Each structure stands twice: as C-alpha cells, then as structure tokens.
Amino acid sequence: MPAQPHEKLPPVRLPSEAELARDALAAPLFAAAVRLARWAGAGTRVDDAGELPPVRLPEAAAALGLDPQDPDAGAHASRAWRVALDTGLVELTGGPDGAGAADRDGTGHGGAGGTGTGHDGAMGSGTGRSGAGGTGTGQAETAGAASHATAAAGEDLALVIGGAPADVLGLWLAACDAVLADAAVPDLGGLVDALGEGGAVDFDRLDWNPQREADLLDAVLADLYLLTAAGRSTAGGTVPLPVLAASAAAPGGIDRPGPAVLERVADALMRLDGQFRQLEPIGLVEFRPVDEAALLSPDDEDPAGGAEAGAPGGRTALDPEDVSRYGTVRLTPLGLYGIRARLLEAGVAAPAVGELAGKGADALLDAVCDYPEPAAEAEIRQWLDSRELPAAAAELLDAARGADPGGPLRRLRCQQALAVAGPEAEPAVRAVLDDPELGGLARVWLAELGAADVPAPDGALVYWLAVDTIAAQLGGAGGADEAEELPLLMESLTAHHAGFFDRAWRVEHPATAEVLEAMGRLHPDKQAAKQARKAAYKTRSRPR
C-alpha cells in the first residue's frame, strides 16, 4: 500500500489479538481456505500453476459443504484454494513430472485450457485438458504430452490450531493481500478480449494499468480508514459508497460536477461495488451492494449527488435510506487492523490506542497531544493501568515541564491524566506546588479533588496559568467543539479578572504574545478584543 497524503492519522482502538484472530478464522473465505488445506491429501494433483483441475472442483466444493451441482460452487472452491495456496496453508510438493496426463483414478490434464479425454497407457480413460480453449480426444502417451504437479497441506496449517493469535493474523494478512490483488484485476471477459498474440495481455487495449488500479484501491481503503478512525463515518461506522467513489474519481474534490465528472463517479461507483463484493468474504468489510434498480430509476438523483451530499460541506440531496441504495461499506475491526498493517508497512504513521503502554511519560504526553480527547483518555488509562500510580503521577508531572511550544498542551494532557489517576496521585501533585510551571496545575487538580489545605495562588501564578491554558487550547486537536469553547473561556477570564490585559501582557510565558493575539481575533466582545491586540503589541515591544 503506497503512503497516502495524510500527514497524521488519528489513533484507532482495536480489539485484542485473540479477538481479531477469532474474527479471522470466522471470515468465510479464510475459513474455506483452511478447510480445503485440511481436505488436501498428500499428492493432490494440481495444474502447473497450483490450481485444482476442473474435475476436482466438485469434490472440493463438497468439502466446503457446498452443493457440487451449484454452478457457483466450483468458483467458490477454486477461489478458496487459491487463497490457501497464496497463504502457505497449501504447498506445492512436486513439479510437473512428465509421466502423463492421467491421475491414478484416471483423471489428468494436458495443455492450457479446454477439456479432452486421454489415458496414461496403463490404466483406463479419464478427463484432461487439451489445447487452449478447445475440446478433443487424444492419447497422453509421451512424456511431453501433459504435465501435472502435486500439492499438500502446508506447514503453516499447524499454526491455525497450535499457533499464537499473531500467527493466525499473519496468515490472514497474507490472504488479505491476495484478495486485494485479485480485486484490482478487471473482469475475465475483458482480459480475454485483450489477449494479444502469444497470450500476452494488451493493457493499452484493456485500458487497465495493474499498478494504477492497485494504487486506486489502496487509496480508497486509506480514505475509508481515515473516515473510520476520525469518527467521520455515519452511525455504525458505515460510509456511503458514493463518497468513496467521488474521492476516487476526483481526488481534488468536486466543485461543479459536470457530465464528464459524474460519469467518472458513476464508473468508480460500479468498480468499487465489484471490488467490495470481493473483499467482504475475507472479513475486511461489511458491505451493502449498489441497488441496481436505483441506477435504472429516472426519478432518482444521480449517484454523484449522493456522493456530494455525503462529502464534508456538500449539499443535502438524499436522505440516508436513499444514499444507502447506492451502497454502503464499513471497515470491520479486523479490516481496521488489516488496513493499518498495510499502512504501517508503507511507512505511514498509523497509531493505535495502547501501543504507548510500554513507553515513558514523555512519549505518552507528546503523542496524545495530537489525539482527539476520547482517544487520549483511552491511551492514558492503558498507560496508567500498567504502572504503580504514585510513581506514574510523578513521572507524568516531570514530563509536563518545558518552555517549548508543546509544553502547554503537555500540561493540559497531564492534568487530564492525573484526573484519571485519582486520589493516589495526591502526594506527587503536592510535591510540585512550588514549581513555577506546575504549581497552578497542581492547585487546580487538588481543588477539583476536594483536597484540604490547598494554598491560594498569587496573582502572577493566576495569570501565568491563564496564558498556559489558552495556549494549550490553541495547540490542541479538539476540532470544532474546542474552537467554539475557546471564545467562551476567553470571555470568562476577562469577566472574572478586572483589568485582565493590564496584567496579562507582563506574564513571563513563551506564548504570551500568541495568546493575546488570539484573544484579539476570537474574543466575542469587540472592546475586549481591541484591548487584547494592544496588550499583544506591548508584549512584542518589551525588551527581552
């Protein structure tokens, strides 16, 4: 998966490896691959590519509990066998031996494609594959007339039962890679039409670039991951398929959709519909396909309208049920794990809640500064759960110090962490009451705890803490909600402290000027905003 242009992805919350491994074993396609690996006996005959010959597919389908008479059963069995082969659940145990086309039961195969009958010269007649795409009858009497290979259960099959959850997930990831590669391939009918001389695929005639198609699918899955991780999907984590189609067809956004753009969106919608149908059986997504009747109805709005309605800032054109008729998709927890693994492999930073539990408090506070508040709290809880609280509280307070630009937000996250820690952190907090950077934080925390004998702060500490708090809010990652709360915080400060700006501009804090300039922009009272701008100028002008 190529790295996507997202600089920082939000952290995701994943189930335990044991839960994910159970989900992987329950994924229909992976479960079928495991069953076929167990079914495969030693010396199972396959063609040169490792595929089961057509005459064995009904037997393989029956092993999967499918009706061999079902026209689709053979295709399901063939797909599961390929996954088993690609993951190492099944291994080739012998190459073409040139001994003849017939199996011991009279079954064999000859060249590539087609069917015919033949015998091995020693036993009865059987069914085999003859020339390319045709049928015929012939004798497999020479060593070069036909070839076959053999396959058997691979060593990795033992990991399904006896391996650790991580081993099972490794096999599932390999299966996922194989399915994603298949999903990027166009339909076989188009491939046949594009076959040139010698059987080579004419990609120009097919208008298909394998790497481009794989990259497009990766980009769509990265977008789906981002929407899921950032909580921007709809209820239940589903994303309307038109949203992803519009992103794939016009990565830069759609301002005024014309006929050409709408046609690209519709084409992308149908391509994604086919691809997600292939990805669902491996457990990557839960998918509701496109309702073809919606595409045929002249009264319905174009699917691109639904895409625009679902996109940020788009108009509201269709209600949720109408949009769902054009398809919806949701990453499963297993799918979230799988796409994250591919992003990490591509060098993309894709954090997960809980991965900081073994790191120091400095790494924790630096990381959660960029997390949305719910994810930050979840990460902090897991970090605290693995430590003795009095010592952990002291470590957090020590890591919160610093005059660098990230210091205010570290102190805010530290205060949140101490709130999670509870009363056991009190000794460590009282120890920093006289600290110029942490004393204000300590008094606020002790007051919220309801502790007795909390010393009152002096005026300088009050104003330093006010500047530090606003600086933390300005540097936070809380999004629109936090942006709405900030003017209210500013208004509250100036209402409760007469002559606020006469004192604030003198505060010895690295962010004083930036905070006052922000108050000049954001304060809801125009007169106070003007005073803030004057105070900021004084701060900038004072000698250093």
Image (cartoon, grey):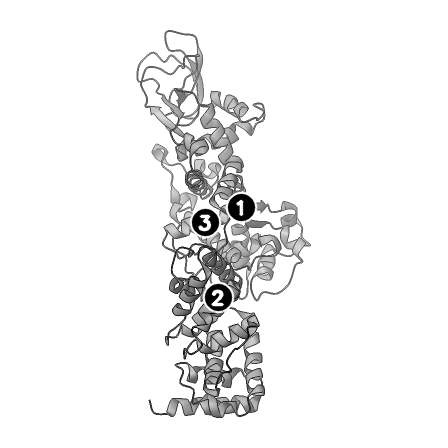
Q: Which quadrant holds the C terminus?
A: bottom left
What residue appears at the point 46 percent right and 32 percent down from the top-left corner? 161
Q: Which residue is mark 2?
A: 425
Residue furthest toward the right?
299
C-alpha span from label 2 to label 1 = 43 Å
In front of the other: 536 or 386 = 386
Q: Badge 3 local density, few (<14 within 10 Å), some, or many (20+)? A: many
Could you tell whether 254 is left or right of 407 in the image?
A: right
- Residue 439 image position (x, y, % from top left): 45, 77
What residue appears at the point 63 percent right and 45 percent down from the top-left corner? 292
The picture quadrant where one finds residue 49 is: top left
C-alpha span from label 3 to label 1 = 11 Å
**Residue type highlighted by circle 1:** Val
**Residue type highlighted by circle 3:** Ile
- Residue 321 image position (x, y, % from top left): 67, 53
Q: Is residue 282 visible?
A: no
Q: State the mark number for residue 298.
A: none
The answer to whether mark 2 and mark 3 are in CB contact below 8 A is: no
Label 1: state its secondary structure: strand
Q: Badge 2 local density, few (<14 within 10 Å), some, or many (20+)? A: many
Q: Which residue is mark 3?
A: 339
What residue appears at the point 51 percent right and 91 percent down from the top-left corner? 531
Work out whether 117 lies above or below 252.
Answer: above
Mark positioned earlier in the residue sequence (3 or 1): 1
- Residue 138 image position (x, y, % from top left): 40, 13
Mark positioned earlier in the residue sequence (2 or 1): 1
Q: How many marks?
A: 3
- Residue 52 image position (x, y, % from top left): 44, 25
The answer to whether mark 2 and mark 1 are in CB contact below 8 A is: no
Label 3: state its secondary structure: helix
Q: Which residue is mark 1?
A: 285
Q: Is residue 242 visible?
A: yes
